[in-house]
Amino acid sequence: MPATASTERARTATARQSSAPNNSQTSFDENWRASLYQSMQAAAKITGVSPASLYRLEAEGKLKLRRLAGRTLVETASLIALADMAEPWTASQRGDEARRARVSRARAAWQD
C-alpha cells in the first residue's frame, strides 16, 4: 500500500525528533568534581552564571582560573569553594511599596 503524504510527513517528523539531541545527553559531566579543571562553559553551567560573571568573580578573588593550551579553565576546587559560600536565598522586600501603591490605586479605581 503506498504511503500517503500525511503518513510520510509524520514519519519524517518522527525521524527528526529521534535524531535531535536530548538535553539530558548534552548536560555537563555528572562526575565534574573528580576533574582538576573545568572549561568555562562547564563551570558556567554548573554554577548557573555566565562566563562573564566567572571572569568577574576571578577579578574579585573568589575564583581561580588557569590557562592551559590556549584555553581558560576554572580550578574545580575554587568552583566548589565558590558554591559553598553562596548565600541562602531570602525573599526581597524591595517591591513591597510598589505593590501596595498598585493595590491602593486599583481599589480607588473600583470605588469611583
Image (cartoon, rainbow, N blue to C red):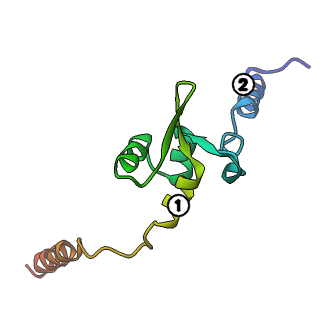
Task: Name the residue furthest left.
Answer: 112
Closer to the camera: disc 1 or disc 2? 1
Q: Quick one: quadrant of the C terminus?
A: bottom left
Which element is circle 2 on?
A: helix
Characterize the local packing of mark 1: few (<14), some (14-19) or many (20 or more) Cα atoms within 10 angstroms. Answer: few
| Residue 75, position as x, y percentages in the image | 56, 47
Rendered image quadrant of residue 5: top right
Q: Amino acid at mark 2?
A: Arg
| Residue 15, position as x, y percentages in the image | 76, 28
Relative to 25, does residue 83 appear above or below in the rendering? Answer: below
Task: Name the residue furthest right.
Answer: 1
Q: Amino acid at mark 1?
A: Ala
Which element is circle 1 on?
A: helix
Near-viewer residue (58 or 100): 58
Rendered image quadrant of residue 22: top right
Relative to 95, does residue 68 appear above or below in the rendering? Answer: above
Task: Name the residue furthest top.
Answer: 2
| Left or right relative to 26: residue 2 | right
| Residue 62, position as x, y percentages in the image | 42, 55
| Left or right relative to 59: residue 16 | right
Rendered image quadrant of residue 16: top right
Say whether disc 1 or disc 2 marks the residue closer to the N-terminus: 2
Characterize the local packing of mark 2: few (<14), some (14-19) or many (20 or more) Cα atoms within 10 angstroms. Answer: few
| Residue 3, position as x, y percentages in the image | 83, 20
Q: CA distance from mark 1 to mark 2?
A: 52 Å
| Left or right relative to 110: residue 46 | right
Q: Quick one: quadrant of the N terminus?
A: top right
**Residue tagged by mark 2?**
9
Relative to 46, does residue 99 appear above or below in the rendering? Answer: below
| Residue at horizontal 36 percent and vertical 75 percent from the top | 91
**Residue tagged by mark 1?**
81
